[in-house]
Image: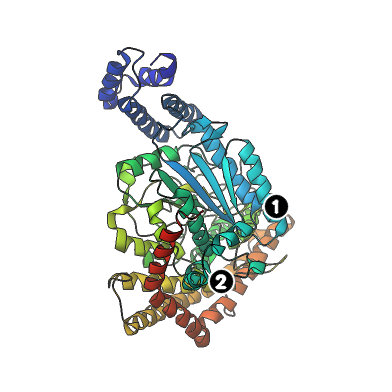
Amino acid sequence: MTARRSEALTEFFNEYEDRRDIHPLTEHWRHIEAEPTNRKPDKPLLEIYHQAASFLEDEIQRAGYRDDLLERHRQLFIEMESHIPCDERDSRFKFIIVIPVADRPQHLENCLSSLLELCRRFGYGGISKQKYHKITVLVADDSKDSANRARNREILRRFEQQGVRTDYFGQPEQIRQLERLNQAERSALKPVIGDNSPNAFHHKGASITRNISYLRLNRLAGDDDRTLIWFMDSDQAFQVNPESRPEGVYAINYFHRLNRLFSTTDTLVMTGKVVGDPPVSPAVMAGNFLEDLIGFLTDLAKLDRRQGCLFHSRETAQTDDASYHDMADLFGFRPKAEAFHYHCTLQGDHDHVRCFTDFSAKLNRFFDGEHPTRQTYYTHQAFASSIKPARTVYTGNYVLRGEALEYFIPFATLKLRMAGPVLGRILKSELGHRFVSANLPMLHRRTLAETGQSEFRPGIDRDSERIDMSGEFERQFFGDVMLFTVEALTGLGYPQQPLSEKRVRQTLRRVESSMLQKYDDKHLQIVAKLVRLKRLIDDQRNWWRQSPDCQHALSNVQRFIRNMDYNFGEASPGYRMIDSAQHREKRRREILEALLALSQTRTDWVETLTKMKHIK
C-alpha cells in the first residue's frame, strides 16, 4: 500500500484525529499504515474504509449535506475500490437492476442517468472492458406505442456506450421466453404470467411484466449465489432528499450497503422505501390533501396580497408515518388530526400573489400522485440499526437473491393495486427474519419537470380538462380488500396451511364489508370538504376574487375542484363502482378463485423454475 493510494483515508484521519468517538479506528489505521507498503490489502483495511465512510455519513447529516463533505465521502469509496482487484478475485455481489416500463421513456432515461451518476461517483466493482462490470440493467418493456419501444431501445444503446451493461427485454423477447413453456405449463401459470395475445402483448400490467421477467432472471442468475436482483420503478432516482437539500443528493453508496447486508446476513429479500412523492394512489390521499388546501387558503386569505411571502418560515412536517394516507390507521399509524402547512418553494423576493399562483400550478399534479404538502424527506440513520423485519414489499425498491424468485407477484392478472404489500404479508409469514426492510430509500418523482405530468399511468384517462381516475380508484379499493384478506388469512397459516373455501369466503366478505364502510365514511368527509373548499375559493371577500392578476391561479384551482368533484364528489364513478353490489360480486368471485388457487400455482411455478433454469 502506498501513500498515493491512501490519500483520501489519510486526509480523513487528519481531519478527525481529535474526535474521541473514532479513536480506536484511528489507532487501527495507524497500525496498518506502519506496515510494509508492499503488503497486500486485506479485509481489515476495507473495513476501515467502510467505518470511515459510515462516520462521515453522520457528519454529512449534521452539517446539512454540504458539497465538500459529500465529495470527501465519494473519494473514500473511489479510493477503497482501488484496493480491490477488478477481476474474479472480487467476490462482492453483482447486481441485475430490473426496470419495468410502459410508455415512459423520459422517466426511464432520467432513472438511468441517475444510475450512471451513481456508478461514476462511487465506482462499485470498478470498470472492466469499459463497463461497470458488476452492474447490469434489464429493462422489461410493456409499452404500447411502438415509438416509445424504439426510444427505449435507443436509450439503452446510449447508456451501454457510456459503460452501463444493458439487456432489453422487449415484447418479442418476452414472448420467446414464454414459448419455452409447454401448453400445460402456460395454462397452469396463467395467474402469474397472464394470457395475453402476441398481437396485443402490451400494458399487461407491472405485476405480470415483473413475473415474466422472473423467468428470464431465473436463467440469468442460475445457480450463481453472488448475484442480487434489484427491482425498481422508472420514476425513481438513486438519490435522497434531506430537508436541507430537497432537490436530491447522492449521499448513499447503495451497492456497497446492499453488498454488506447480503454478505453478512442470511437475508433473502430486502425492501427499501421511497422518499419524495408518496408511493400511494391519489385515491387514498384526497381527504388529507383537501384539508391541507383549505388550511392554506384560509391562512392566505388573512394576509396582505402584496406582503412578502410568509410561507417559508414554517416547519416542514415529516411524513415517515404514512401521514399522506387518508386511512393510515389501517396500517397501524396514528392519523394526524391537523392540516399540514404548505412550504413555498419559490426562491427570491415574492409576494402572496406569486405564492398562490405557483401553488395553484401544482394542484392538478395531485392526480398523478404528487402531494404538495406531504412529501417525505430523507432522515439519515445508521444503516445497521435500520435493518428490521418487514411486512411490505415496495415493488419500486426491493432486492432478492436468485432463490427468492419462487416468490412471484401474486394475483397479477387481477391488476389490483397493493400487490407489494400483499406479497409482503406472504413473505413475512414464510421467511420471518430473512425478509427485512432497511433505510435505503430512492427518490420518487411522479411527474416530469418539463410537463408537470407523468408520461403514462394505468387507470387514468385524461383530456385537456377532465381527469378520470375511476379505474385506478376501483383497483385501489379491491387491492385493499385483497391485502387485508391475505393479512387475515396468513394469521391462520395461509398459504402453506390449506384453508376451507368457506373460511376464505367468510374472511373475504368480512374484510370487504369493513373496507366498504371505511371508504363510504371517507367519501362523506371528502364531499363535505369539497363544499368547504368551493365556498372558500368563491367567497367574494377574499382578495383573489378581486385581483385581475389572480385569474390564472383561480382557473387552476377551479379546474382542480372540477376534477376532484368528478372523481370524489357525490356522483363519483369510482364510488359508484365499489357501491355496486353486482360489481363487487364479480370482483369477489375473482378474488376468491385467486386466493384458493395460489397454493397450487406456487407449486407449479417452482417446478417450472427448476426445470427451466438451465434450458438454453
Q: Earlier in the sequence, mark 2 or mark 1?
A: 1
For disc 1, the marked residue is: 150
77 lies above or below 179? above
Image spot of residue 179 (x, y percent): 56, 64
Query: Image height check: is 390 above or below 71?
Result: below
Q: Measure the C-alpha gap from mark 2 to mark 1.
A: 24 Å
Secondary structure at numbered mark 2: loop
Circle 2 sits on which residue?
195
Identity of the amino acid at label 1? Ala
Q: Position of residue 142 (x, y in %)?
A: 61, 60
Given residues 322 and 235, the one toward you in this image is 235
Q: Residue at x 52, y 84 (%)?
A: 583
Say what secondary structure mark 1 lies in. Answer: helix
State the image coordinates of residue 259 (x, y, percent, origin top left). Answer: 39, 40
**The N terminus lies in quadrant:** top left
Disc 2 residue crowd, few under 14, some 14–19, many 20+, Cα 10 Å: some
Please state the horizontal and vertical placement of residue 102, each as a whole percent of the image. 61, 58
* Side of 103 where 515 appears, left or right: left
Name the residue furthest right: 548
Of residues 502 and 236, the one nearer the viewer is 502
Q: Amino acid at mark 2?
A: Asp
Q: How many residues crowd around disc 1 within 10 Å: few (fewer than 14), some, or many (20 or more)?
A: few
Is residue 559 visible in the rendered image? The answer is yes
Question: Residue 272 got which mark?
Answer: none
